[in-house]
Amino acid sequence: MGQAVARISDWRERRALPKQGIDAGRVDLYSAIHKGLRSFMAETLVAAGRMDPLDDADTRQTLEQVRALLDFCRGHLEHENDFVHRALEARRSGSAAASVRDHAAHREAIDALEGDASVVELASGDERRIALLRLYRDLALFVAENLEHMHVEETENNAVLWATHTDEELKRIHVALLASIAPQIMETGLRWMLPALSPAERAAVLGEMQRKAPAPVFERALGIALPRLGERERAKLLGALAPAPQPA
């Protein structure tokens, strides 16, 4: 109980700090993809909690989602290491140190969770139920730690990036990062990110793709988003996007 009270007190202190890392006028390398990650993590945690360990099909489907999340998280760590941390360290030595340590711990946690998932897969009956509970609780801790980690990145790391880089420099970093992502991983990211964004954010992402990406790439992204949006969200998105050019 004492630890819980200490964490609540710590949360209050951090929340009372000046609202650093909140600047709608600056390029933000973290916000959009982190919304997608939060959605992916939350839905996967809920899926693990309600999984029926006596149902092999349900078990297989849930473990596929858990593993997809872990694969995506591993790739996300590497992308931030290679592009964002490098940018931080280039302009302010030591500014990425805490995030680097967190990422090393996250890689270990991902490996452990993959082991948990394999135990669930190979077990049966009551043993599977017990193994599932362990996976669920370990996954919950992983999600909880990541939520806090992402907050630090969005506030403290962003504050450094904004103090040391222009928006044009941050845009170039973002473009290079996106270019390094394999198409399958990109589709997974869009599948979780686009529905998690606000209407204005969603329209901005897809509007930029419409202007700059090849038409098939934009159409694929739009096709990923639309089935996962409600009727009002679809209408807002389509209304915000430029109409397709008509043949002469």
Image: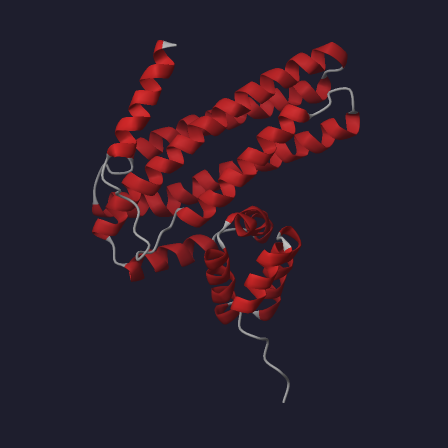
Quadrant where the N terminus is found in the figure: top left
Q: Is residue 76 left or right of residue 4?
A: right
| Image coordinates for residue 239, horizontal then vertical, percent | 55, 68
82, 56: nearer the viewer: 56
Q: Position of residue 158 (x, y in %)?
A: 30, 45
Q: Position of residue 132 (x, y in %)?
A: 65, 18
Compared with 54, 208 (above or below) is: below
Say which quadrant the C terminus sits in: bottom right
Q: Is residue 184 above or below residue 59?
A: below
Dividing the picture into quadrants, the one containing residue 64 is top right
Q: Is residue 31 left or right of residue 21?
A: right
Left-right relation of 172 to 138: left
x and y percentages locating residue 110 in the rendered image: 52, 28
Give me the residue at 34% from left, 21% from top: 8
Inspect this view and state whether residue 198 appears: yes
Q: Looking at the picture, does residue 159 appear above or below residue 176?
A: above
Q: Kindly identify the residue that appears in the image at 36 percent across and 59 percent down.
A: 171
Q: Residue at x 50, y 57 (%)?
A: 199
> Colour scheme in the image?
secondary structure
Who is closer to the viewer here, 219 or 232?
Answer: 232
Residue farthest along the front direction in this orientation = 232
